């Protein structure tokens, strides 16, 4: 009876939950620190959010198919190891190293896709396996030594265009591309159908296997992009590079409204989720909070946002079944 | 238009179809009925090109028709609308219609969706079925009836000559059905050959010029509209005359009130609903789709919150929002949507039947459950229901037909030996034979003192089954009727469903 209407009202509210939460966070930190609400700091936050944001954009495509990619952080390490080795040991030009890093990302993504589509391994298991393999390869290449990159590479992160650092432009470009792909191409729209009900998609003539492969490859590509952004900021390939960032990307996507059960969500939402997480961290830094409480507060914000979301939506089971 | 000659198909040891010859003329609706397992699905899949017959041939118009793949059927102009809808709730109407073949524009390898063409195609397709929804409406916002029409619009986009509709009305309300029938008659007038497969004999009688009856893979008979009788149709379907679909009651309801609902107000309703259910009574809950029948039962059982109103079981108040407490108090609920709320499809039949009784079947305080005890408790109930399986312990529920799955769910709750059994659409999508078994079981339970509340959209079912019928309208009970010597008064029931208050 009134249930249908109540749901649509809730849905309207849905778009705003995270926005309102974000507004509250911004207001709180602005009061707490005079250095928070400035253009410089805003650009800072965006730069810091670019790594996880870019990764979350590609991950969203995989999650839309009701899949999962846990290999993101290790892909960043492997790509960085290859890129670092090329620049430092082989004296390759930076452009070549960049191309190689993106190619490594796509390659890892294709391996994930093959395992999921051809070998029919469940996405979580397949990408956990690849997580270890990719990290292992990365460590093998670097022999677990730290690799220091030349300044030329560092400039990738510090160069500015119209006063805005390149990572922010990169994030913007990845977000825009991801959004266009998911909302404006047949491929993107069909990803939603695959995630909502694979059988329906198959019956309608959607090339399910090829699309899922492509989604994993694109997630690998954005993980490669994120690897470049991260390496440019760190300027060092260390064994722990990228560790745990896959979980942060998943948190960002879920925060931004991407369903863990597939078929629901959007790329800009996932990127916004990354921005929320980074804003909290940046704010805590500016108010000189004890570093030990960073993870606590970040975790608290993620749980709060997701709890609000599922309370509003009803049970997660219903979420899975669609409206 | 479409002729089938001597079609046979065998799966392993099962002869699914043997020597079936049918014809589906253009510009007519032809009915196809039969129990689950009679061969309807196999026949449909043969026509749709999903499976190939072992022998026999088909003819479409004047040409031979030999589809080897579903796409062959599409191209030849044969479209099938499946029983379960093939729609993605989160995508728009237009996107759902175009799902496999989006109109695209682009430069070289860069291609994007041509949104204007997409919208135009959608508007045209939707107009053809007389539906008034915007192309960008998410399908999740549409009513079941509207979704069904969208599905048909999708099938019509390929301009088929033959349209097969499999159980199109299972989730529709009365007015939605009539609207669909109007559309079917119009398409018929345009010269399509329509094949209408249904368990609802009333619909078949209304729509179909000729009806074929399948039984055990053979053609059991055919009936023309003039000579159609439900009685004869049922006799043909089950192979023997069915003296009474609804068994005669032997006992009478007792005075003792087992379940009392007092002023339970559903969210958004103006007034509360009150009900009393007696020991050994079958109470029907009627009302239009959206009148709050399902919501009332879910709220009283504790599946949904119940902000206002009391529920008493044996005179003791039942706390809101706790299905566990409801089960402990002796209630059992069989929900409408068995796939989502009820069954572990990948579980064995026996495990599914035992699910709600495990604590009771546990032998010791440590909670060990003996497989033998579970089998002893569950198998007799499943056997009594004639769940079609030779191995309850091993066969998965997912391999059973819809009717048998429903029997598994009912068995589960019977094993709990409830005092009050709440049934929401217990026979939806179930064939006649299974229906009779379910009706008989309800009577047996009631004679043993159980109180049963049945929600159903089929008025005939409620009239045949119930001692009393309560009619709901906008969340409140708008009328209560006791079975008279001549049964029930249709007009009074209908008036109450539309909200006119009248007491009997």
Image (cartoon, coloured by chain):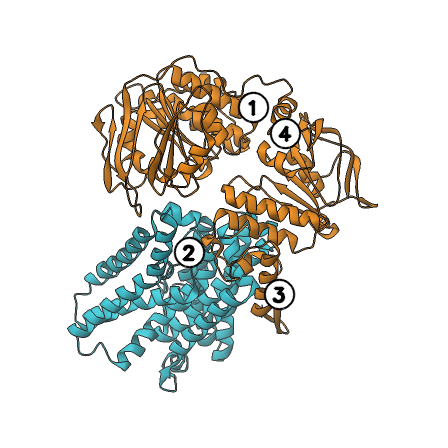
Q: Residues within 10 Å of mark 4 (few under 14, many from 20)?
A: many
Q: Of circles 1 and 2, which is in front?
A: 1
Chain represented in cyan: A
The residue drawn where x is 53% and y is 21% is: B245
Real-space CA distance between mark 4 and mark 1, rounded to the nearest whole angstrom: 10 Å
Real-space CA distance between mark 3 and mark 4, rounded to the nearest whole angstrom: 40 Å
Real-space CA distance between mark 4 and mark 2, rounded to the nearest whole angstrom: 50 Å
**Residue, far right:** B62
Q: What x and y, as percent, mark residue A287? A: 17, 71
Residue B433: image tag: 1
Task: Describe the element under mark 3 as helix, strand or loop.
Answer: loop
Mark 3 / mark 1, whichever is N-terminal: 3
Residue A70: image tag: 2
Chain of the residue under label 2:
A
Q: Do callouts 3 and 4 mark residues in contact (Cβ within 8 Å)?
A: no
Real-space CA distance between mark 1 and mark 2, rounded to the nearest whole angstrom: 51 Å
Task: Judge by depth and name the residue closer to the eye, B257 or A227.
Answer: B257
Task: Describe the element under mark 2 as helix, strand or loop.
Answer: loop
The residue drawn where x is 65% and y is 53% is: B156
Q: Residue B212: name its quadrant.
A: top right
Q: Which residue is mark 3?
A: B103
Q: Residues within 10 Å of mark 2 (few under 14, many from 20)?
A: many
Q: Which residue is mark 4?
A: B34
Observer able to see residue A141: no
């Amino acid at each position: 009876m009134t249930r249908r209407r109540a749901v649509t009202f809730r849905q309207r509210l849905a778009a705003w939950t995270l926005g309102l939460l974000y507004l509250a966070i911004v207001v709180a930190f602005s009061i707490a620190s005079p250095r928070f609400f400035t253009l410089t700091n805003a650009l800072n936050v965006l730069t810091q959010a670019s790594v996880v944001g870019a990764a979350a954009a590609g991950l969203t495509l995989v999650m839309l198919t009701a899949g999962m990619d846990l290999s993101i952080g290790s892909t960043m390490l492997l790509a960085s190891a290859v890129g670092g080795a090329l620049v430092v040991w082989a004296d390759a030009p930076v452009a070549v190293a960049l191309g190689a890093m993106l190619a490594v990302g796509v390659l890892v993504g294709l391996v994930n896709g093959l395992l999921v589509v051809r070998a029919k391994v469940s996405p979580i298991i397949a990408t956990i396996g690849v997580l270890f393999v990719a990290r292992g390869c990365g460590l093998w290449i670097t022999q677990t030594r730290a690799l220091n990159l030349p300044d030329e590479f560092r400039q990738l992160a510090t160069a500015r265009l119209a006063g805005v650092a390149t990572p922010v432009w990169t994030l913007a470009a990845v977000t825009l591309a991801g959004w266009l792909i998911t909302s404006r191409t047949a491929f993107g729209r069909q990803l939603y159908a695959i995630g909502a009900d694979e059988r329906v998609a198959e019956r309608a003539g959607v090339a399910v296997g090829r699309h899922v492969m492509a989604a994993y490859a694109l997630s690998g590509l954005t993980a490669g992009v994120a690897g470049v952004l991260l390496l440019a900021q760190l300027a060092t390939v260390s064994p722990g590079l990228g560790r745990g960032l896959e979980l942060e990307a998943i948190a960002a996507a879920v925060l931004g409204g991407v369903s863990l059960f597939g078929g629901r969500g959007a790329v800009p939402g996932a990127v916004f989720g990354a921005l929320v997480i980074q804003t909290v961290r940046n704010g805590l830094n500016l108010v000189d909070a004890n570093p030990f409480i960073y993870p606590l507060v970040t975790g608290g914000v993620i749980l709060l946002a997701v709890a609000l979301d599922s309370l509003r939506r009803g049970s997660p089971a219903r979420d899975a079944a669609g409206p | 238009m479409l002729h089938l000659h001597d079609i046979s198909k065998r799966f392993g040891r099962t002869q699914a179809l043997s020597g079936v010859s049918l014809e589906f003329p253009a510009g007519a609706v032809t009915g196809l009925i039969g129990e689950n397992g009679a061969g309807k699905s196999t026949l449909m899949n043969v026509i749709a090109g999903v499976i190939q017959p072992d022998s026999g041939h088909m003819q479409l118009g004047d040409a031979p028709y030999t589809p080897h793949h579903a796409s062959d059927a599409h191209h030849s102009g044969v479209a099938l609308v499946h029983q379960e809808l093939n729609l993605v709730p989160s995508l728009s109407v237009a996107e759902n219609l175009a799902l496999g073949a989006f109109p695209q524009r682009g430069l070289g390898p860069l291609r994007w969706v041509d949104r204007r063409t997409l919208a135009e195609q959608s508007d045209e397709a939707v107009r053809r079925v007389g539906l008034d929804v915007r192309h960008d409406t998410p399908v999740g916002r549409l009513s079941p009836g509207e979704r069904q029409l969208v599905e048909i619009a999708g099938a019509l986009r390929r301009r088929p000559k033959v349209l097969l509709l499999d159980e199109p009305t299972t989730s529709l309300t009365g007015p939605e059905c009539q609207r669909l029938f109007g559309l079917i008659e119009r398409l018929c007038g345009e010269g399509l050959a329509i094949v209408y497969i249904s368990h609802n004999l009333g619909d078949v009688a209304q729509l179909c010029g000729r009806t074929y009856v399948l039984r055990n893979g053979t053609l059991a008979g055919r009936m023309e509209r003039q000579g159609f009788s439900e009685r004869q149709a049922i006799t043909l379907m089950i192979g023997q005359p069915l003296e009474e679909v609804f068994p005669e009651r032997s006992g009478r309801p007792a005075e003792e009130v087992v379940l009392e609902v007092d002023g339970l107000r559903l969210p958004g309703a103006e007034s509360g609903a009150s009900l009393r259910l007696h020991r050994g009574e079958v109470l029907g809950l009627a009302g239009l789709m959206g009148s709050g029948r399902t919501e009332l039962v879910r709220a009283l059982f504790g599946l949904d919150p119940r902000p206002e109103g009391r529920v008493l079981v044996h005179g003791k108040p039942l706390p809101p929002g706790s299905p566990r407490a409801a089960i402990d108090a002796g209630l059992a609920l069989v929900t409408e949507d068995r796939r989502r709320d009820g069954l572990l499809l990948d579980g064995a039949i026996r495990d599914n039947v035992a699910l709600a009784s495990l604590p009771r079947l546990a032998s010791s305080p440590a909670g060990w459950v003996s497989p033998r005890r579970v089998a002893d408790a569950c198998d007799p109930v499943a056997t009594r229901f004639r769940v079609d399986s030779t191995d309850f312990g091993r066969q998965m529920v997912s391999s059973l037909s819809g009717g048998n799955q429903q029997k598994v769910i009912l068995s589960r709750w019977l094993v709990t030996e409830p005092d009050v059994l709440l049934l929401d659409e217990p026979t939806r999508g179930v064939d006649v034979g299974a229906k009779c078994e379910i009706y008989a079981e309800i009577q047996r339970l009631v004679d043993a003192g159980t109180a049963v509340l049945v929600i159903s959209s089929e008025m005939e079912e409620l009239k045949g089954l119930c001692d009393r019928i309560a009619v709901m309208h906008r969340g409140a009970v708008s009328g209560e009727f006791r079975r008279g010597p001549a049964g029930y008064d249709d007009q009074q029931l209908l008036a109450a469903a539309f909200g006119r208050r009248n007491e009997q």
